[in-house]
């Protein structure tokens, strides 16, 4: 579902006049900043994933409660730069075509490993919902035998991921790794995240859950694959990368791509699918990071990614700033009041998302906020939803003022057609 916004020729004329007067930065310079920030963000994501890879190697080599905790901490840290890249989706096809490999959710975790009996079994929608490949060195897929004696990155990416064309068969990426580190969160709306024991990786008689050697194989393969996928995407934003070239091929299309990413992530994806939908269903399984209870951070850093793209500023994980001519500068040259409005609304949204983050870090987890009748939780989540919707309205106005033609934003039934959610 998309929402399409048109512009006017008068707006385009005003923009051209401002640019001719020298008040506006060149669009190509804005695109260079945007691409430089993308390169930095994906490189940071890669660096953090390599630290996760090292922590996973330590856990597999010497299973212990301490090493499991370290691997979990590395996973949470790896999400910080990655979530800030999500604003590059929607407007950049090369990112959209790739993103499902690394951040697809929700997933039918029974495809990967053992699950609680209450999880259920195979369904008409997904016969592989409880395949448990970790316990299955061979199985059938679409009527053909599959040799899974060794769990490799190729098995995960080429055979299992979205097997049978079913999106819930997520076998790769951050959330598959998250499940392998935390296990299912069986607490419902109660306190606590997943609590997988470190002995699920023990290589002796203390092994729990069975198949500890294969579970370790899966975790290593999934983490190695995440690293290689991020290596590929980081390269696409370098000076000779395909994503940078596609972005800068046409200046107006490039600016439209920035706004498409901002508007689609703000509205349909984050406000709708990731926040409002879960609140409507009161379903903790609709958390973005549902095994680790890290959803508050994912929402916060998604919002921050939108803000830093508009402002043309990003601070790398080592503290190095990346900045340059920005979309904010372009808007200010044409309509200073509109630029101030956009910056104010972005700040308001970040405050609301920060309130969710602060509450969660104080012990009020996001899945607790989703519980029906929890007024405090609903207030916090809806504060974020309303901020994201409100800033999208200003993004619509920016599209119009810049005179860029039609720009389509992702929608969500939870916002556009709420009755459909319950059908």
Image (cartoon, rainbow, N blue to C red):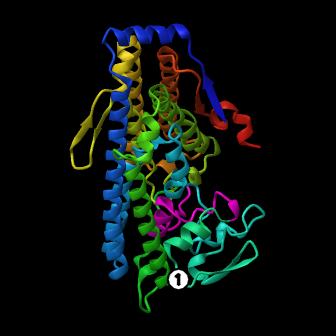
Residue name at image x 58 percent, y 31 percent: 409
Label 1: state its secondary structure. Answer: loop
Q: Quadrant of the C terminus?
A: top right
Q: Does residue 156 lie above or below 322 as drawn?
A: below
Task: Judge the density around disc 1: few (<14), some (14-19), many (≥20) Cα neighbours within 10 Å.
Answer: few
Residue name at image x 33 percent, y 28 percent: 29
Check if residue 182 falls in the magenta segment.
Answer: yes
Q: Quadrant of the N terminus?
A: top right
Check if residue 205 falls in the magenta segment.
Answer: no
Residue name at image x 42 percent, y 52 percent: 233
* Res. 404 in view: yes
Is 300 left, or right, of 411 in this rendering? left
Is 221 left, or right, of 114 in this rendering? left
Residue name at image x 55 percent, y 66 percent: 157
Q: Does residue 80 lie above or below 328 as drawn?
A: below
The image position of residue 86, as x and y in percent, is 46, 44
Q: Does residue 256 lie above or below 77 as drawn?
A: above
* Res. 194 in view: no
The image position of residue 78, as x and y in percent, is 36, 56
| Bounds of the magenta segment | 164-189
Q: Nearer the viewer, residue 174 or 422?
A: 174
- List the residue tagged with mark 1: 150
Is 91 left, or right, of 239 in this rendering? right
The image position of residue 212, as x and y in percent, is 47, 83
Q: Nearer the viewer, residue 409 or 22?
A: 22
Q: Does residue 278 lie above or below 170 as drawn?
A: above
> What is the count of numbered marks?
1
Residue 49 sits in quarter: bottom left
């Amino acid at each position: 579902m998309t929402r399409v916004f048109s512009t006017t020729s008068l707006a385009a004329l005003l923009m051209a006049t401002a640019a001719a007067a020298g008040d506006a930065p060149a669009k190509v310079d804005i695109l260079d900043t945007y691409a430089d920030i993308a390169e930095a963000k994906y490189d940071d994501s890669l660096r953090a994933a390599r630290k996760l890879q090292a922590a996973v190697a330590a856990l597999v080599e010497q299973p212990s409660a301490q090493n499991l905790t370290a691997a979990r901490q590395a996973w949470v840290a790896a999400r910080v730069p990655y979530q800030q890249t999500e604003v590059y989706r929607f407007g950049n096809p090369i990112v959209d075509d790739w993103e499902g490999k690394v951040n697809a959710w929700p997933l039918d975790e029974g495809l990967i490993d053992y699950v609680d009996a209450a999880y259920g079994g195979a369904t008409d929608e997904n016969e592989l919902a409880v395949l448990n490949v970790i316990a299955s060195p061979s199985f059938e897929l679409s009527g053909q035998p599959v040799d899974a004696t060794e769990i490799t990155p190729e098995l995960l990416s080429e055979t299992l991921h979205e097997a049978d064309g079913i999106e819930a068969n997520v076998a790769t990426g951050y959330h598959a790794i998250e499940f392998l580190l935390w296990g299912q969160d069986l607490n419902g709306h109660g306190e606590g995240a997943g609590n997988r024991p470190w002995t699920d990786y023990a290589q002796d008689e203390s092994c729990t859950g069975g198949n500890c050697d294969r579970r370790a194989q899966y975790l290593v393969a999934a983490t190695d694959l995440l690293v290689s996928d991020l290596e590929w995407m980081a390269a696409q934003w370098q000076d000779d990368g395909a994503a940078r070239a596609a972005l800068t091929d046409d200046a107006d299309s490039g600016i439209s791509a920035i706004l498409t990413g901002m508007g689609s992530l703000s509205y349909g994806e984050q406000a709708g699918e990731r926040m409002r939908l879960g609140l409507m269903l009161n379903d903790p399984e609709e958390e973005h990071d549902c095994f680790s209870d890290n959803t508050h951070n994912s929402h916060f850093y998604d919002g921050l990614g939108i803000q830093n793209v508009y402002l043309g500023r990003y601070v790398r994980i080592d503290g190095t700033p990346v900045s340059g001519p920005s979309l904010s500068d372009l808007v200010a040259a044409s309509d200073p009041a509109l630029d101030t409005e956009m910056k104010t609304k972005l700040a308001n949204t970040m405050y609301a998302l920060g309130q969710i983050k602060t509450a969660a870090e104080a012990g009020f987890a996001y899945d607790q906020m989703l519980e029906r009748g929890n007024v405090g939780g609903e207030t916090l989540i809806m504060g974020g939803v309303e901020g994201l919707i409100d800033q999208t309205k200003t993004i619509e106005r920016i599209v119009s003022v810049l005179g860029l033609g039609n720009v389509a934003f992702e929608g969500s039934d939870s916002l556009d057609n709420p009755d459909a959610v319950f059908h």
